[in-house]
Amino acid sequence: MGPHASPAMPSGSAGSRGTIAALAILRPRTSAWSRFADGLRRMLGLHPSLVVAGVRYRERGRESLRRALSSRGSGVKEYDVEFPDGKRTRIRCTPDRLYADLSGPPLAPAYLACDPLIRPGMRLLDASCGTGYGAAWLAERVGPSGAVVALDRDLESVRYARMRYPLGNVSFEPGGVESVMGETDGAFAGVFACGVPLRGQDATRVVNEWWRLIAPGGWLLVVAPLSTETPLGLGAIDARDLLARAIVGSPIEEEAKETRTIPGLSTHAAWLVRKPPAPGAIA
């Protein structure tokens, strides 16, 4: 049988949710008093700080993160960051560059949806890793015998991810699909693509390259915003047809056009495409 595209996504296990929390992906809660004190410090020109998993974030400027990223804010919030090993950097939070330690993990449910697909020892590709929290979770799931290659075109995100998640089995690299074109066919057991632009003729080239990199029996998971008004947004049917055309050469049949969102992430939809196993392989 040819590859089968499915709109339905499995939900993550309870154990994986605990792992996500252990990776400090959930934003620490603050009390009303703490928020008041932080506001007072800003008014006085002082800079509140936050420590998460040994990483210290010191605010710059008086505008709060929530205000800065709102429709009425400046759109940018800067922090000076110090890591447990003494390394330091400055980060700039924007609506398109979010840090899990500060604003929570908006796409964590998409990574959790991968949980039933992942086995120890797998080699995975995260095609758009952002600031790295999801790739770090994938790396923990595949274990020391596995590996994760994590790509992103935003150099600041990659620089931060390398310092925040210094794991031996994950490699954070700048770039997109062109960065792995030198990999052999079937180099990865799975490809996770969240928020990668998929429009026009270039989209087919990108999907074809992902498909080439997937080993027989592997999988491709594409996650995209449902709204076509965003730069990365895809219409639900357009996205699934694009994947089908790129992989099997024709649109998905009419009865398969139902789209399901990811549990806990109603703004996005996922399309899971599995590659047939090699002839003679044991299912």
Image (tube, rainbow, N blue to C red):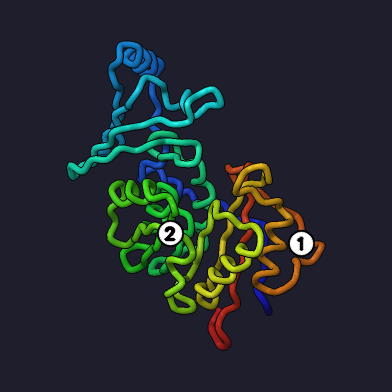
Nearest the eye: 118 or 251: 251
Q: Is residue 72 left or right of residue 58?
A: right
Residue at 61% from the left image edge and 62% from the top image edge: 203
Quickly name the residue at label 2. 175
Q: Residues within 10 Å of mark 2 (few under 14, many from 20)?
A: some
Three-letter amino acid code of the residue under disc 1:
Ala
For the N terminus, the image quarter is bottom right
Residue at image point 38% right, 50% down: 155
Q: Which residue is mark 1?
A: 256
Where residue 271 sits, quadrant-wise, is bottom right
- Tell me the residue at 30%/29% (across/down): 50
Q: Position of residue 113 (x, y in %)?
A: 54, 54
Q: Is residue 15 visible?
A: no
First-in-chain label (2 vs 1): 2
**What quarter of the picture does the C terminus occupy?**
bottom right
Q: Residue furthest right?
A: 254
The picture quadrant where one finds residue 256 is bottom right
Say which amino acid is labelled 2. Answer: Gly
Q: Viewed as shown, does residue 146 lie left or right of 89? A: right
